[in-house]
Amino acid sequence: MRFEKFPQALPLLCMIALALTLALPAMAERGDDADRKSKNGLTSGTIDGVEVTIEYGRPKVKGRKIWGDLVPYGKVWRTGANEATTVAFSTDVKIQGEALAAGTYSLFTIPTEAGWTVIFNKTAEQWGAFSYDPALDALRVEAKVAPADATEALEFVLEDSDVVLKWEKLAVSFTVEGAG
């Protein structure tokens, strides 16, 4: 097509190209899960005036021993499957009473039999925990851990002022409050 014959088409084509340029990176963040065993999950909502968005992979129990086996105790875990789980806060927050700036973080955990550590790392986009660097941690807090009803596929939910990870027969949570 020659644009001198259709000058009105040029602005429209430029708008389409711009829209695709802006939209494609956002759509590709977690990758296509069509062929993945662990499908992508998305949880979002508002806690204490803060918009919270969590993107994660949803592994399934499938009869396996999870805690201390598939997910080893005492080691950094990506807290999901595939790409590292990310959590975004629209404004500055307090997590378990500790300050954390607005932004998007990778969310890692260190599960142990005695308790869990939740880690907010400044490198949001990374695959699993393979390139995790503790020097880039923005915050570490201790989580609340409790027995829960069986949950086959890992999920995050927002309950009152808490972000709660549910999987297998465990619920792991941390409190979010607006910093203002």
Image (tube, helix red, strand yellow):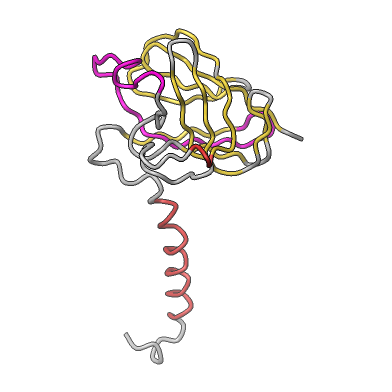
Residue 65: within the magenta?
A: yes
Residue 96 appears left or right of 148: right
Residue at 30% of width from left, 23% of height from top?
A: 60
Task: Please report the bounds of the magenta region as a residue range.
Answer: 46-74
Say which quadrant the N terminus sits in. Answer: bottom left
Q: Nearer the viewer, residue 91 or 136?
A: 136
Residue 97 occupies which quadrant of the picture?
A: top right
Instruction: Decide: is 119 above or below 162.
Output: below
Give coordinates of residue 134: x percent, y percent: 49, 37
Give coordinates of residue 100: x percent, y percent: 65, 36
Residue 167 occupies which quadrant of the picture?
A: top left
Residue 5: within the magenta?
A: no
Residue 100 appears left or right of 33: right
* Main secondary-structure element of the magenta-colored stretch: loop
Instruction: Decide: is 145 above or below 8.
Output: above
Residue 134 appears left or right of 175: left
Residue at 44% of width from left, 19% of height from top?
A: 111
- Seen as rendered, the residue at the extreme bottom is 4
